Image (spheres, rainbow, N blue to C red):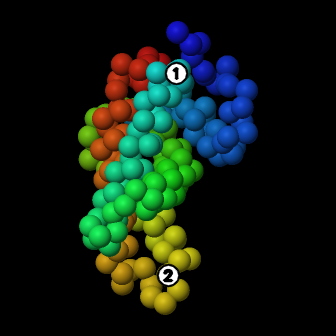
Amino acid sequence: MDKPITSANPPKNFFILFPPFFQLLLFGNIIFRKGKIKTRKISINSYFLKRYITCLVLSAISVSFLTILLTKGISFLDVLTIVFVSSYAFILYLIFASPLQFFLNKNPKKFNILFLIIYLLFSFLLIFILFLFTNNDTGPLFISNYYIVSATTGIVFWVFDSIFLQDETFLKQEF
């Protein structure tokens, strides 16, 4: 079995992949409980990375399929469109949702409603910013697709996060 990666033993290429802010979320490991600050390290091994990548890939494919189906209809469902939208969604999930996911996984809970609300808030905020740059004619709040895409991305990511990564056996560690 692989040696776990901790803040004392980070992978060699880790600092190239993630900016310092994300490194703080991953390895700063600050948890607030009852007025006290406690720290915990998440063990990142090959089993965790496989489940993490599976969560990202399935979330990206599912959200692309649902977004195309709900916004454009079944006539736009073809392999090339799903691959393009999935790769776009994967990159956005990797950049923006992963740090939040690592932060929330320090206290794992399957299908936690608070986690859903947090994912939805961040999803609505990110999609709002993306719609501002892509839709110049109308504000994002007046487009029904904004609400569909935002809700879909948050809910799908929450479901796959709860299935694959909110497992206390490999995430929860003693202080």
Please say if 83 is above or below 137.
above
Mark sitting earlier along the chain (1/2): 1
Please name the residue shown 52% across and 70% down the image: 130
What separation in Å lies between label 1 and label 2 (alpha carbons)?
A: 41 Å
Under tag 2, what secondary structure?
loop
Please say if 164 is above or below 154.
above
Please say if 21 is above or below 167.
below
Q: Where is residue 51 in the image (x, y as percent from the top left)?
A: 43, 30
Q: Name the residue under label 2.
A: 135
Q: Mark 1 points at which residue?
A: 46
Q: In which quarter of the image is residue 86?
A: bottom left
Viewer can see residue 106: no
Q: CB under 8 Å between callouts 1 and 2? A: no
Q: Where is residue 11 in the image (x, y as percent from the top left)?
A: 68, 25
Check the image and name the residue furthest to the bottom: 137
Check the image and name the residue furthest to the top: 1
Please name the residue shown 47% across and 28% down the image: 50
Under tag 1, what secondary structure?
helix
Amino acid at dot 1: Ser
Left or right for 173, reference 110: right
Left or right for 84, reference 159: right
Q: How many marks?
A: 2
Q: Position of residue 74 (x, y in %)?
A: 26, 67
Q: Residues within 10 Å of mark 1 (few under 14, many from 20)?
A: some
Q: Where is residue 22 in the image (x, y as percent from the top left)?
A: 61, 43
Please name the residue shown 51% across and 53% down the image: 87
Please say if 47 is above or below 70.
above
Viewer-side residue, 51 vs 101? 51
Please name the residue shown 46% across and 54% down the image: 83
